[in-house]
Amino acid sequence: MSSPLPWIKVYGDLPTHRKSVTLAALTGQPRAWTHVVELWLWASRHAPDGDLSKMPPAAIAVVAGWRDDGAAFVKALQDAGFLDGLHLYAWMEHNGAHHRKQAADKVRNSRPTGDTQVNKNVLTSESLVSHQQLGSVESIEYREENKDKNLALFGDRKDASEQATATVEPPADTPAKPRRGRPPKDRSPEAEAERQQERADADRWIAAARDLLGLTAEQAPWSNDTFMAFRQARKKRGVEQLMAAIEGLRGDSFATGLGVRGLLSANMIERGLVKQTKREGRIGLGIESTWEKYFAQHGGQNDQ
């Protein structure tokens, strides 16, 4: 007996299909369709062509798991459309691929072991083909005997090819290939001046940041990540706003707990600018504003 098939095709609407509803009505069993699935599973192993003509109705009922009258069950299967005579309806249409696979497996399993041994120099559809076999139709022994000759032959060709390549030079007017990667650095006086100004602004800012955090240059050195963050923030806001944000964060316990890199985050810059703006507003309402308010309450006289 051949090995069982791994699965059969069962559509998801089988429980509510017209045939299943008809079978339930004929047998009085609402889940009579489950016995059809049992019958299909049995047929996938023992009757892969769907032919049940050699089985009496009682046997068909047994393999389907039906425990009542077998003849009535088979008649109900025929009336519902699950059986065409004593053949499973449209079995080959839905599960024919399984039948063909099972037949092929049976032929392959029945082949004698000696038939699978093939000559090393003969390629068949079942041969284990390697790159060495595809490269030549000569025998392995012949290739081993002439290996040194072949290596010498191809070695001469390789040397000649390398020499020919080495002696060939491109024409003088051949344009140079564009260099790939990072674009060349701008060496113009304007670019150099901008880089110097950027470095001066960076030194000015980090000195204020270290003073805010209470750190030395050794404790808070420049890093590539911090310097790139400074460049981006400077380009977006300008160095004066960055300095104002540092001033605004003085006395802020949260800011003093951050590192130098944290002071360049967008949130901390906004926080420092807001605090600095409020602080400048309070300074504007200092002594002079207080005197103006006093004089306004006393008739505007300022003789004293």
Image (tube, rainbow, N blue to C red):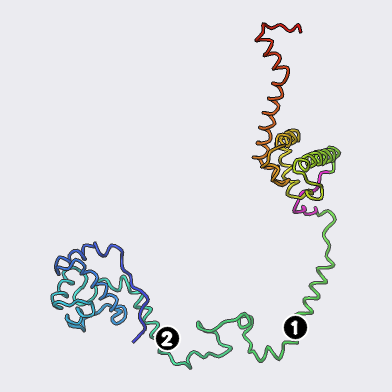
Picture mark count = 2
The percent coordinates of residue 152 (x first, y second) are 77, 83
The percent coordinates of residue 244 (x first, y second) are 73, 33
* Mark 1 lies on residue: 151
Q: Quadrant of the N terminus?
A: bottom left
Q: Quadrant of residue 29?
A: bottom left
> Vertical placement of 70 versus 196: above or below?
below
* Mark 2 lies on residue: 108
Q: Quadrant of residue 231?
A: top right
> Vertical placement of 163 versus 288: above or below?
below
Instruction: Report if residue 129 lies within the magenta region.
Output: no
Label 1 Cα neighbours within 10 Å, binned few <14 / some 14-19 / many ≥20? few
Residue 267 is labelled as none
* Residue furthest to the front: 304
The percent coordinates of residue 224 (x first, y second) are 76, 50
Q: Main secondary structure of the magenta part?
A: loop
What residue do we see at 76% from left, 51% from top? 182
What residue do we see at 75% from left, 83% from top? 151
Label 2 Cα neighbours within 10 Å, binned few <14 / some 14-19 / many ≥20? few
Instruction: Report if residue 181 lies within the magenta region.
Output: yes
What residue do we see at 65% from left, 36% from top? 271
Q: Which residues are magenta?
A: 175-186
Disc 2 marks a residue whose amino acid type is: Arg
